[in-house]
Amino acid sequence: MRRKIVAGNWKMNLSFTDAEDLINDLLDTLDEEKPTAEVIICPPYPYLELATDYMEENLFKIGAQNISSFDAGAYTGEVSASMLKSMDVTHCIIGHSERRKYFNEDDKMLTAKVNQALAHQLTPIFCVGESLPEREAGKDKEVVRRQVRHGLFHLDTVEFARIIIAYEPVWAIGTGMTATPEQAKDMHAYIRTLIAERYDEKVAEETMILYGGSCNSENATDLFSQEGIDGGLIGGASLKVDEFISICKQASAK
Ligand code: PGA
């Protein structure tokens, strides 16, 4: 089985001191436990430097939660891919449902963000997922198909190989209503079918697809043991050291 990935999305949480404590606790515990899963933490922008400063033992990688769709210049309030790259950030969440919903990020903007990330050697963690009404109307696959196609299928094979996808059903995010392992497995398999159609079977097989949405220490093993689930994008549970480390350990189990 290939190495799984666990990414912690801290969202807009924690004071500077709390963030420093969490990073220290994570470092100590990861050093002790040495999970084999690849661990990525995605703190808010102002705390990224803290995380990169502490990164000396390479126990985790660092991702941003967002990037600008623009390259550089007069875009007040924006943070560019090249700035992140210059401070040892390696990953970037793009297209999270909260960005799509509250900041009106549409397919066109997300395509530009993916291009920016790739142009500056950041690995995009590209999020897709349907809302509850969309699932109830039987449109879940149609929605995910649109998001994957519009966000990613302009890439050539070499570029696409650098993408991580996160399937995050919107109804599962922060609600405690985790997708069942079968629902998650089914959508992951569907995403691979789309990739195989656009690229080929090998690319589809090799693409890392994470599950996100109320993943915690109680359900991580059930989710991660499903075929085609390569790890998790963790929100709430990534703010608690014990929970997060437990998830990392479950992702490391053979
Ligand atoms: P959650 O969030 O784990 O708190 O549901 C996941 C995410 O939004 O990435």
Image (cartoon, grey):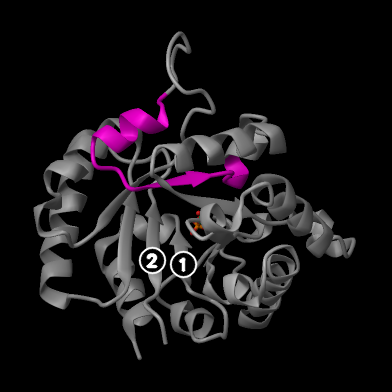
Q: Residue at x 15, y 48 (%)?
A: 21
Q: Residue 12, located in which quarter of the rendered image?
A: top left
Q: Are marks 1 and 2 in contact (CB under 8 Å)?
A: yes
Magenta stretch holds residue 80: yes
Relative depth, front residue between 71 and 39? 71
Element class at badge 2: strand
Image: 73 above or below 41: above
Q: With respect to residue 94, does 74 lie above or below?
A: above
Image coords of residue 60 (percent x, y): 24, 59
Neighbours of disc 1 within 10 Å: few (<14), some (14-19), many (20+) = many
Front in this rendered view, residue 202 or 189: 202
To which residue does mark 1 refer?
Answer: 232
Amino acid residing under circle 2: Val
Q: Which residue is mark 2?
A: 6
Q: Residue at x 36, y 30 (%)?
A: 82
Q: Residue at x 61, y 81 (%)?
A: 181
Dividing the picture into quadrants, the one containing residue 202 is bottom right
| Residue span colored magenta | 79-98
- Residue ranking furthest to the right: 137
Label drawn at residue 206: none
